[in-house]
Amino acid sequence: MTIKDPALFYGPAREVDTGMTTEKVTRALFDEVMVPNYNPQQMVPVRGEGSRVWDQDNNEYIDFAGGIAVNALGHCHPELVSVLKEQADQLWHLSNVFTNEPALRLAKKLTDATFADKVFFCNSGAEANEAAFKLARKYSYDNFGPEKNEIISFKQGFHGRTLFTVSVGGQPKYREGFEPAPEAITHAEFNNLDSLKALISDKTCAVVLEPTQGEGGVLPGTEAFLKGVRELCDQHNALLVFDEVQTGVGRTGYLYAYMASGVIPDVLTTAKSLGGGFPIGAMLCSDKVAPSLGFGTHGSTYGGNPLACAVAEKVLDIINQPEVLEGVNAKNAIFVEELNKLNERFGIFKEVRGSGLLIGTELIEQWHGKAGEFLAAAREQGLMMLVAGPNVIRFAPSLIIPDEDIRTGMAKLGAAIAQVLENAEG
Ligand SMILES: *Cc1c(COP(=O)(O)O)cnc(C)c1O
């Protein structure tokens, strides 16, 4: 069927004063038609390949941001493109009234590769956490009664933007104005066992943490802390939930960050890198707790859809290989070396931290609050990077970023820092 007159289907096109017709849209249009909850950079990317991105004016960027720790295999990885196209010709969606082959294969691979026995699929990190927190409450309700319902998480932690996840998250600014929030949630100090001890009790149903706090400033949990949290959970029959939405799927040089410390959670959430840029999230859990999400207790229309699962299966196949994971650690060494060199030149970093390709550099006090200035200057030099709060510059590039792109990006970062310092003096 040919559609002769699109207006018959969509109604007459509305005039917008950017002069926009169907062919060209610009950044200016964003402010006109989008809710202002984001403030994207002043250019519009249109194409990506590996760790390089091009905007509407064909300016080239090195990508140290990876779509906020999502594009774990860079942009348009040929094997991901091919598996997505193949699946697009097969089957897109069925709902959970039916299961499908890609979802079953992905669940099998995730359970084979981790502590988990069971998987629940959804579409984002927040949804994976929502499932985890609901499961924690339900498991305690089923096994210990309704009084055991308290969730303890950590200050500066980040778990997503739904009302439950901003409530468990440790940054009050994300829930301010949205109250009343879900109750029985308290926040301890990260890497401080005494602070957790003061809050935990037999009424605690779960302790929730990121093995390395990502958005909160790239702060790794120490091994002693993680072990101590596990012990306290065991003493109080509380579930341990690891939010590995950012740290998972190779990001820290291990398939999942819990594998570095040997501390095994009861529930783990994963998203971001899992889909390599295609939306998917998953909650993984042990057979002990899975029965509490019995038939009809929870669900998601799109969860486990064949397109997302086919892509994620390929992502997992590629990343869960020793060469790729070792490569992440080798690339970490280049990042750290280059950042230290920049610091010898400029002296603006207080500390370089993180592991694998989740790296944060905290600025010295004098530059606190100004991480965003470096981000904007880097973009002008043709480099995409991230912040983690106002004081920390964050890098979360493709796990297979070519070494040459790391060095090229670092030269751009050097130019950007020089520019910011010059502006500050001038
Ligand atoms: C990004 C992130 C989330 C939220 O994921 P969405 O896909 O944006 O919902 C949750 N937890 C952590 C640790 C994250 O980094």
Image: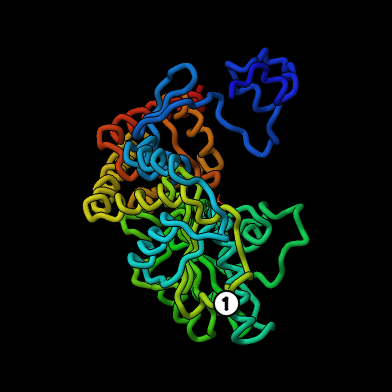
**Looking at the image, residue 397 lies above or below residue 290:** above
**Residue 299 drawn at (x, y percent):** 61, 62
221 vs 362, nearest the viewer:
221
**Looking at the image, residue 306 lies above or below residue 188:** above
**Looking at the image, residue 163 lies above or below residue 143:** above
Q: How many marks overall?
A: 1
**Looking at the image, residue 375 lies above or below residue 258:** above
Q: Secondary structure at mark 1?
A: helix
The residue at 26%/42% (across/down) is 334
The residue at 51%/52% (across/down) is 305
- The image quarter containing residue 406 is top left
**Residue 322 drawn at (x, y percent):** 23, 56
The amino acid sitting under disc 1 is: Ser
202 vs 106, nearest the viewer:
106
308 vs 10, nearest the viewer:
10
In the rendered structure, the answer to whether residue 234 lies left or right of residue 320 reads: right
- The image quarter containing residue 408 is top left
**Residue 209 drawn at (x, y percent):** 51, 65
In the rendered structure, the answer to whether residue 48 lies left or right of residue 166 reads: left
Residue 392 shows in this picture: no
To which residue does mark 1 refer? 292
14 vs 181, nearest the viewer:
14
